Image (spheres, helix red, strand yellow):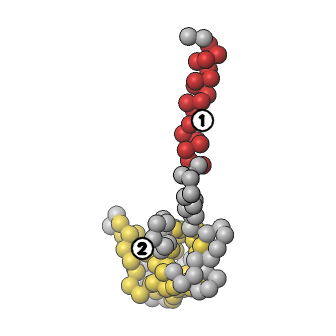
Amino acid sequence: MNVRRTAAAVVVGALVPLTGIVTTHAGATPVEHYRISVHVSDATPASGEQFIVRGTFGTTSAAATDRPVKVQSYREGSWHQLTGAVVRTDSEGEYRCRVVLSQTRKRLLRVVGVAPEGARNAFHKFSVTVG
């Protein structure tokens, strides 16, 4: 086999997986990826003290309006929904949730923006240290 043909086959073989990621089937619309941001009012709240979790949820081209956003805590190897920590986004994709934690220590949390059917939910992890 010719060295040029071998080199060309290697280059084409390396490009095929990359083009498969970018292209879509004829007539199909590309799925938009949802993103969520998070900001906390106090990264070191006292036990039983309220703090605010806020941010925006949507795609790069549009806000996710009237979509649920949940706050979850990582405990015992899995994510658990915080009781009462579910809000809906407003017309601009913004959310605001009051949270109260009582267990003192560093807590790993995340916000989950629930995307419409057919799209993946958006997650953003953060931590607070409850004193």
Q: Nearer the viewer, residue 74 or 32?
A: 32
Residue type for callout 1? Leu
Helix, strand or loop at disc 2? strand
In x, y percent, where is residue 22?
Answer: 60, 49
Q: Which residue is mark 1?
A: 15
In x, y percent, where is residue 36?
Answer: 57, 71
**What is the distance, in whole Å, between disc 1 and disc 2 at their CAs?**
41 Å
* Residue ID at (61%, 80%): 93
Q: Does residue 7 sit above or below 27 in this rendering?
A: above
Which quarter of the image is occupied by the N terminus?
A: top right
Residue 73 is marked as 2
State the residue lying farthest toward the front.
27
**Camera-nearest label, 1 or 2:** 1
Q: Does residue 82 sit above or below 110 in this rendering?
A: below
Residue 41 is marked as none
Please count the marks in the image: 2
Q: Does residue 2 sit above or below 79 in this rendering?
A: above
In x, y percent, where is residue 51?
Answer: 54, 85
In x, y percent, where is residue 130?
Answer: 48, 78
Q: Is residue 45 left or right of residue 3?
A: left
Helix, strand or loop at disc 1? helix
* Residue ID at (43%, 75%): 72
